[in-house]
Amino acid sequence: MQEVYEFLKNCGTYYLATAEGDQPRVRPFGTVDIFEGRLYIQTGKVKEVSRQLQINPKAEICACVDGKWLRVAGKLIRDDRVEAKKHMLDKYPELQAMYSPEDDNTEVLYFEDATAVFYSYTEAPRVIKF
């Protein structure tokens, strides 16, 4: 999981896919954290992505950097603990003007039953499960 985290941090922007009924939705994201042995992302509860994930927690991330790419699929589970939110926001101080660990909007989610696959044009795919 550490390798997945480092790849996502290195690429800066990754793309998160969710479902809204039968319509896929994809948008750029940039937050990633490891807290208590789990891989987390962050968003706001007022956003459509949050509503989509509460209806269907299955999601997938795709990220690319230097001719390599990563796909991470699994369920994103909301963690409402202040400690989890604070850990994330401490890593992204620029978000603290918009989000707070104590507000009703900040949402952190962790991957459950995740499968990460690293790809490149020159190497066989490599799978990591967490």
Image (tube, grey):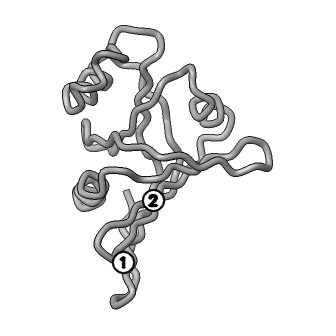
Q: To which quarter of the image does residue 96 belong?
A: top left
Q: Residue at x 30, y 15 (%)?
A: 97
Question: Residue 39 location, x and y as percent?
Answer: 33, 45
Q: Check residue 72 in the rendering and tell me which mark sits there, or answer none.
A: 2
Would you say 64 lies left or right of 89 here? right
Q: Residue at x 26, y 51 (%)?
A: 9
Q: Amino acid at mark 1?
A: Arg
Q: Amino acid at mark 2?
A: Val
Q: Check residue 126 in the rendering and tell me which mark sits there, or answer none.
A: 1
Question: Residue 129 location, x and y as percent?
Answer: 39, 63
Q: Given contact means CB atoms under 8 Å apart, are the residues at marks 2 and 1 in contact?
A: no
Q: Tell which of 21 and 97 is nearer to you.
A: 97
Name the outermost residue toward the bottom.
122
Chain-order first, disc 2 or disc 1: 2
Residue 29 higher or lower than 104, as above or below? below
Q: Secondary structure at mark 1?
A: strand
Residue 20 higher or lower than 91, as above or below? below
Q: Quadrant of the N terminus?
A: bottom left
Figure label count: 2
Q: Residue at x 37, y 81 (%)?
A: 120
Q: CA distance from mark 2 to mark 1?
A: 12 Å
